[in-house]
Amino acid sequence: MLLLQHLSQIISISKTLEGEINSIAKEINVSKNTILVNHKERCRNLFFIQKGLVRGYYYDEGKEITNWFAQQEEFATSFYSFITNEPSPETIEALEDCQLIQISHADLQDLYKKFPETERIGRIITENYYIKLEERFLNIQFRSAKERYQNLLSKNPSLLQRASLGQIATYLGITQETLSRIRAEL
Amino acid sequence: MLLLQHLSQIISISKTLEGEINSIAKEINVSKNTILVNHKERCRNLFFIQKGLVRGYYYDEGKEITNWFAQQEEFATSFYSFITNEPSPETIEALEDCQLIQISHADLQDLYKKFPETERIGRIITENYYIKLEERFLNIQFRSAKERYQNLLSKNPSLLQRASLGQIATYLGITQETLSRIRAEL
DNA sequence: GGTGATTTTTGACAAATGTCAAAAAGCGAA
DNA sequence: TTCGCTTTTTGACATTTGTCAAAAATCACC
């Protein structure tokens, strides 16, 4: 399982722990356009993406604004809702047919209790996600629309083929028209 | 010690753990304008603010851009540098005379090893900081300069008295002139 | 392969914010 | 109190990006 491989890069996973993880990790396949978490609904699951592409988006003045994309070997959840148990401000949808691993919040808390060494995994993963978010924050604050697009293009070129321009534009914090113009002039 | 109080809100702290924390937590007093971490230098310390105000800032085209403010009962560090051990992209300075608790990265790692339950504290604190950063990210992406200012004003009015307008403006992602105009029209 | 829906591009114009320069206000030290 | 330095405000103008509408291109499905 890709998830176990991924986690074992952080700490070594004992056979018992491996068994426990296997027992709480539910492998699910969802088809393109499936809504994994609905806006205003509590998000009690963490998803690990074994294959496919998922995005989280907000509604702002009736329009969908992409908050993040997650692909193979990344986690996806409404972080805010998962942690606080408040309704999710964002909707999560599969942009492609996906093979996911689903872990419930309750099972994860049990895992933390039973295997305290997994707290370490949780901490390190959260730290890394924090750093990624910080980088994105700085990007949006300091860089022009064009620079952000070029940055995305160099770091994640395949995304441009897999998501629509409108989805990518709002992810970059610009309108679709602006993105279209940026592309035209390059 | 305020730090212990703060941590005990997350998990209960045993007497042994308390002793250990006391032994690695160095209380320091720094005066206004002290640079705690220099840009391009590795940041190997975590600071907990018992009293005072600290800010982290970047240089962008020669100008200082405030990345964050931290005050009483908050942690301050160059998160990126602390976690990755790379040189810090940001400078950290005390904006007021401060009473801080300093914990080194090495000591913290030892603490995590000796007292695995502290991993939980680390995870939860990181999660909360993640949520705060996400909120700020959405704020800057969705809200106008004026809304961001009003938001800050309502959530943290004292900051306006304690930091300069220039520092606050760049924190809000706008220029000082724009902030000045926003204030004038209210 | 054709057709209706969806996505992307283009145009004209508007709004928000930035830049540069200078004036005004505030503040600390002698 | 005054002088010099720093911070804040104001003015004129430029730039970036957004908005709304329509045309063009692309895609999915029959």
Image: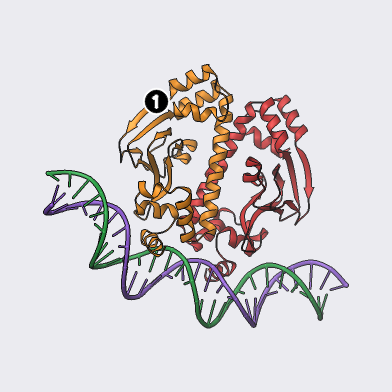
Chain colours: A orange, B red, C purple, D green
Q: For label 1, count other residues whose C-alpha is less than 10 Å away and answer few (under 14), some (14-19) or many (20+).
A: some
Count all numbered tags in the image, as a single digit. Answer: 1
Q: Is residue B74 visible?
A: no
Residue A27: percent from left, percent from top: 38, 27
Q: Is residue A87 left or right of residue B162?
A: left
Q: Is residue A163 left or right of residue B24?
A: left
Q: Nearer the viewer, residue C15 or A175?
A: A175
The image quadrant where one finds the C terminus of chain A is bottom left
Is disc 1 placed on a helix, strand or loop?
A: strand
The residue tagged 1 is A26
Q: Nearer the viewer, residue A95 or A154?
A: A154
Residue sticking out furthest to the top: A16
Q: Is residue A56 visible?
A: yes
Q: Chain of mark 1?
A: A
The image quadrant where one finds the N terminus of chain A is top left
Residue D26: percent from left, percent from top: 27, 53
Q: Residue B136, relative to residue D20: is it above or below? A: above
Identify which amino acid the numbered label 1 is placed on. Answer: Lys
Residue A75: percent from left, percent from top: 46, 36
Residue A11: percent from left, percent from top: 58, 27
Q: Nearer the viewer, residue C3 or A157?
A: A157
For image coordinates 49% across by 59% down, the residue present is A147
Q: Is residue C13 left or right of residue A12?
A: left
For image coordinates 31% across by 38% down, the residue present is A34
Can you tell which quarter of the image residue B100 is in? top right
For image coordinates 55% across by 48% down, the residue present is A134
For image coordinates 43% across by 41% down, the residue present is A70
